[in-house]
Image (cartoon, helix red, strand yellow):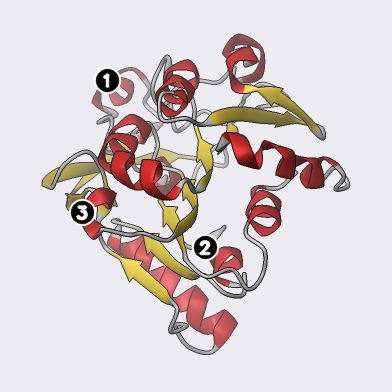
Amino acid sequence: MQEIDFHRALVPPGSQGTIIDAGAHDGRLALDLAAIQGPRLLAFEPLAAARARLEAAFIARFGALPADVALRAEALGARTETLTLAVPRIRTPDGTAMDAEEWASLAKDYAAIAATDPRVLAIHRHDVAVIRLDDLGLDDVLAMKIDVEGFEAELIAGARETLLRTHPVLSVEIEERHRPGSTSEVPALLASLGYIGFWEFYGEWRPAETFDAASFQRASPSPAEFSASDPYVFTFYFVPPDRVADLDVLARLPVR
């Protein structure tokens, strides 16, 4: 199952409210979320270069930035502050150098990895604004996609009131290589807010607490190492108890 299938199934066309994309990068999911008819999209991307490409991608697809799409330059976290976003520059297997933007993180600096892995060529650091989702006072959040490279707990802490008030469905990318222990800690944190978590394995929904990172997330913490376990499972899904039955719709989709 693809992540967008989850959101399309649980946010039917015509729904009124807001979808949050935290860590939108340059639009891998944001463009398809924006295409869901009805809700508005708030896309948070603190890395300026990625946000510029995201805006260009919206214009290329829709002709202009849609009126119901807002691109936000802040990151979401536990408090209002300024933090450093670390972006590693790596040497790829073919010998070229590139900024590994999808590894951009507020949770780690990469300095220790760079000290032991010569393929990490540099670390670019960007000061970015961080806000709490709760401070936006949203009463209509339908769904959230969270992809924040180890900063999940901080984001959830700053979104606690919104989650309790609006009960959106969530897709969260959680990886041990970004934050050891997170595949158990983040589901436990969301469970304390009333969420039931799952991971999907070839069409089968499995409880989040059954996830075995040693089997399904074997990977180096280095952004320059591209090998990983097969399969490598990193997307988790969370729903309020009254939405669990809705996952049956997804179970009937063809496996992709």
Tell me whether circle 2 and circle 3 mark residues in contact (CB < 8 Å): no
Tell me whether circle 3 and circle 1 mark residues in contact (CB < 8 Å): no
Up the image or down, 8 lies above or below 215; here it is below
Residue 24 visible, this angle: no
Q: Is residue 154 left or right of residue 187?
A: left
Residue drawn at (48%, 16%) of the image: 184
Q: Nearer the viewer, mark 2 or mark 3?
A: 3
Few, some or many residues within 10 Å of mark 3 (<14, 14–19, 20+) = few
Residue type indicated by callout 3 = Asp
Residue drawn at (43%, 25%) of the image: 186
Q: Label 2, on which residue?
A: 30
Q: Label 3, on which residue?
A: 135
In depth, the one of 98 and 108 nearer the eye is 108
Few, some or many residues within 10 Å of mark 1 (<14, 14–19, 20+) = few
Residue type indicated by callout 2 = Ala
Find numbered disc 3 in the image and state the secondary structure of the residue it sits on.
helix
Q: Nearer the viewer, mark 2 or mark 1?
A: 2
